[in-house]
Amino acid sequence: MKNQYEQHLNAAALEEMGVPVISSLKQKNMLSIEAWLNSKSRVAIDYKNNTQEIITNIVTKHT
């Protein structure tokens, strides 16, 4: 989204992870988008499961 700072940060983070990033959804980028959608390559992300830690912190601070 044009001039949305958060979207620039999202794009930078994705780019660091190896995800192709384009500047706009204009017709000139459609081939790149189609190639990415048809690509078999995936970016593996291993998110830490810290749900219990978050819940414990919330309960501790609000009880």
Image (cartoon, rainbow, N blue to C red):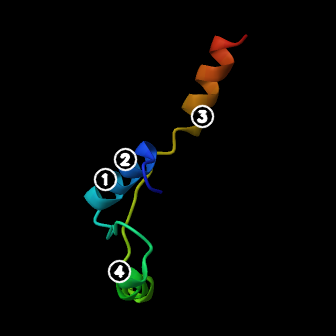
Cβ–Cβ below 8 Å for labels 4 and 3?
no
Residue underneath mark 1: 12
Distance of mark 4 from mark 3, alpha carbons? 32 Å
Residue underneath mark 2: 9
- Among the two numbered marks 1 and 3 on one chain, the one whose residue lies closer to the N terminus: 1
Q: Quadrant of residue 40?
A: bottom left
Crowding near the residue tagged with mark 4, few <14, some 14–19, many ≥20 C-alpha atoms within 10 Å: few
Question: Which amino acid, by three-letter code, is at mark 1?
Answer: Ala
- Among the two numbered marks 2 and 3 on one chain, the one whose residue lies closer to the N terminus: 2
Secondary structure beneath dot 2 equals helix
| Circle nearer the viewer, 1 or 4 | 1
- Among the two numbered marks 4 and 3 on one chain, the one whose residue lies closer to the N terminus: 4
Q: Position of residue 44 (x, y in %)?
A: 37, 66
Q: Residue at x 29, y 60 (%)?
A: 15
- Among the two numbered marks 1 and 4 on one chain, the one whose residue lies closer to the N terminus: 1
The circle drawn on residue 41 is 4
- Relative to 6, 16 lies left or right: left
Crowding near the residue tagged with mark 2, few <14, some 14–19, many ≥20 C-alpha atoms within 10 Å: few
Question: Which amino acid, by three-letter code, is at mark 2?
Answer: Leu
Distance of mark 1 from mark 4, alpha carbons? 19 Å
Residue underneath mark 3: 52
